[in-house]
Amino acid sequence: MTEGARELMTDIQLSRQQRKRAEKISQLEHVAARMFAERGFEAVGFEDIGATLDLRGPSLYHYFSSKEELFLACIRQSAKEVANRLHAICEAGAEPMETLRALFEEQVIIELRDYPEYVPLFFKLYVPSSEIRMEILSLRRAQAEIFENTVRSAFGLAPHQRLIHQRVALEVAFGALAYLPEWYRPDGELSVDEIAKTMGESLVAQFIKLRCS
C-alpha cells in the first residue's frame, strides 16, 4: 500500500470515529434532556444518564466530564435547533405579520411534537449553578429577539425605538406558549397542527389589533 493510500485509509477511519462520536453525543444529549425535563436536574444522576445508553464509568466520561457539562450541551444544542428553525421562517421573506404568525405556529409544534423537553429545560427547571442559570437566560433572550425583531418589522420600528404595547402583547404570547404543555393532551380533539394554527392566529391577532389602532 502506498503512503497516499495509507493516509486516505487513516482519514476514512478518523472520519468514521468522529461520526460515531458525534452520533453518541447527540444520543446522550437527547436522552439527558428528556430525563432532566421529566425528573428535574438534581434528581437525575450522571451515571443514570449514561446507563440508558449502556455507557458506564470511564466510557461515559469520555464524552462529558460532569452532569453540568452535559446539561449545558443539552440547552445549547436544543436552543440552536430551535433558533435555526425560527430563523428559517424569518428568512423566507413573508410579510412580517405573516412571519410572526408562522413563528408562533412553529414554536407550538416544537414544544408539543418535536422537542417537548424544550419548555421544562428553559422555563421550569431549577438548576443550582448560577452560571448555568445565566446561560439559560442568555439563550432565552436570544430566542425572544427573533420574535421582537419580527414585531419591529411589522410595526416599522427602528432598533432604538422601544416596544411598549407590543412588549405586553409579546409577554402574553410567551406566557401562553410556556404553559402550553401543561394543558395539551395528545388524545385531545385537536391535532398538534390544528392547535398550532389556532394559537398562531390567536396570538398574532393581538398585534394586528395594535397595528390597526
Image (cartoon, rainbow, N blue to C red):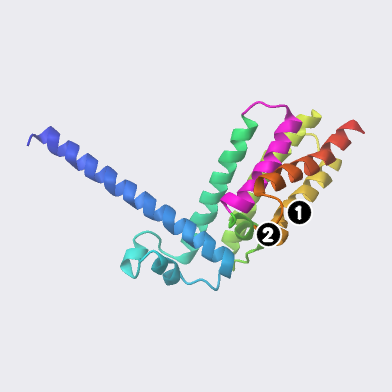
Please state which of residues 95 and 69 is positioned toward the viewer in this rendering: 95
The circle on residue 24 is: none
In the figure, residue 14 lies in which quadrant? top left
Residue type at the position of mark 1 = Gly
Residue that protrudes farthest toward the left in the picture? 1
Residue type at the position of mark 2 = Arg
The residue at 88%/36% (across/down) is 209
Measured as percent of width and height from the top left, residue 125 is found at: 62, 64
Label 2 SS? loop
Question: From the viewer's perspective, is 172 left or right of 60?
Answer: right
| Quarter placement of the N terminus | top left
Stretch in magenta: 92-115
The circle on residue 185 is: 2
Question: From the viewer's perspective, is 200 left or right of 29?
Answer: right
Label 1 SS? helix
Residue 164: tell me if it is visible.
no
Question: From the viewer's perspective, is 65 left or right of 96?
Answer: left
Please state which of residues 47 and 201 is positioned toward the viewer in this rendering: 201
Disc on the earlier residue, 2 or 1: 1
Q: Is residue 95 magenta?
A: yes
The residue at 59%/66% (across/down) is 127
Location of mark 1 (residue): 175
Q: Residues within 10 Å of mark 2 (few under 14, many from 20)?
A: few
